Image: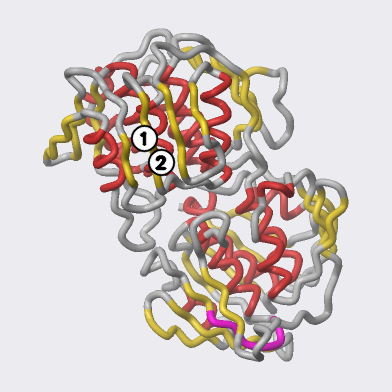
Amino acid sequence: MSSFEIQGGTKLVGEIVPQGAKNEALQVICAVLLTSEPVVIENIPDIRDVNKLIDMLRRLGVKVRQLEEGSDEFGRTFEFDASEISMDAYQEKDFCIQAAALRGSIMLMGPLLARCGKAVVPQPGGDKIGRRRLDTHYMGMEQLGAEVRYTVNGYQVEAQQGLKGCYMLLDEASVTGTANIVMAAVMAEGKTTIMNAACEPYVYQLCKMLNRMGAKIEGVGSNLLTIEGVKELHGCRHRLLPDMIEVGSFIGLAAMTQGDITIKNVNVEHLGLIPQVFRRLGIEIWQKGDDLYIPSQEHYEIERFMDGSVMTIADAPWPGFTPDLISIALVVATQAKGSVLIHQKMFESRLFFVDKLIDMGAQIILCDPHRATVIGIDREYRLRGVRMSSPDIRAGVALLIAALSANGVSRIDNIEQIDRGYQHIDERLRRLGANIKRID
């Protein structure tokens, strides 16, 4: 187990480039299983979850090759050749353990079902942030004609008669559920209509990639997708978007450390409400072309609603504020002037890291598992360094941001959680002037 040791209180200055989008990578890498032709994907981040998924593809028989062309310091380019794939890996105990440890492995189901007619799905793991049901995935596959059987170790999904298009109304606008169903439906017989589809940029990007491969998907970017099944798909070249969660994290980092930071090449059109929400917390953000510049601010003040009531920051399906940035918004509010209600609607355990911020001196009232009231202290006094442990990816980075702004030395244990979603974060922060080191 590794830890970060952080000497806080340094103003961070400079430019930083967001990595390729983790959540998009987990989807489009699974999609390479849909074709026997080579697929090239650019801007793949070097993070634990993505690397585990690539290793799983290798074990399924996919030939994976890293290319020099298109690779740069923060984004790798890989060629995937899934001309020969085998389900034999699912008979290996260690492969199933690996699949169960990675929540993104659930998205192997749709492509394998479309290409091979069957899939095995170990019960996936991931962050412990509350209930994360998978009903949408399995109900969608059943409506396409697959049979889902529960076993002790997970699920077996099989389409003996092939997949057939249909109309379906998703019970929730699940991002991974939508992606999985779309990947199965593109090679199903006939027409599939998906109502209440997720329309996050990750799904948008996946659908655009599949269309370049020869799929026929209409309504891309909306919550109503129409898919005409095709018999085969072809190779293509695809580039991942910048990770909008990293962009939001860096905005919060700049505000908390009174830094002067430019976030390069953020692809503003796919950030949705992220800049607007942080501006409501009082953070000054300037757009310069496709870059965001956050100037140094001694103070920032939380807005109120037009009727004078206390601001509420809540997560919502796209284009609402992404739940992955609720933890960052909460920690930023601790040093603002004013109060805000943070409402995490989706996951009932995601706010349980606030006790660590309270230990650091933050004024937070945890109202219930989904809501916390933050009373901003307007830098009247700085947070203090403490020892803590990262409970999940996003809370871990929120604690890291708090530690970088705090007085004294902090230590964050279990940073493998942070490494799952943020590429070489300590090295990148040191380039901005952060005093952070990785210790075993």
Asked if labels 2 and 1 touch by Cβ distance under 8 angstroms, the answer is yes
Give the label on residue 181, or none: 1
**Amino acid found under the numbered disc labelled 2:** Thr
- Answer with left or right where residue 404 lies relative to residue 173: right
Give the label on residue 151, or none: none
Where does residue 353 sit, x and y in percent of width and height? 46, 72
Residue bounds of the magenta highlight:
336-341
Query: What's the coloring here?
Result: secondary structure
Secondary structure at numbered mark 2 = helix
- Answer with left or right where residue 430 lies relative to residue 399: right
Indicate yes or no whether the magenta region holds residue 339: yes
- Answer with left or right where residue 14 lies relative to residue 249: right
Q: Residue at x 50, y 9 (%)?
A: 37
Q: Quadrant of residue 265?
A: top right
- Answer with left or right where residue 242 lies relative to residue 395: right
Where does residue 414 sit, x and y in percent of width and height? 46, 58
Q: Which residue is mark 2?
A: 178
Secondary structure at numbered mark 1 = helix
Q: Is residue 254 above or below residue 190?
A: below
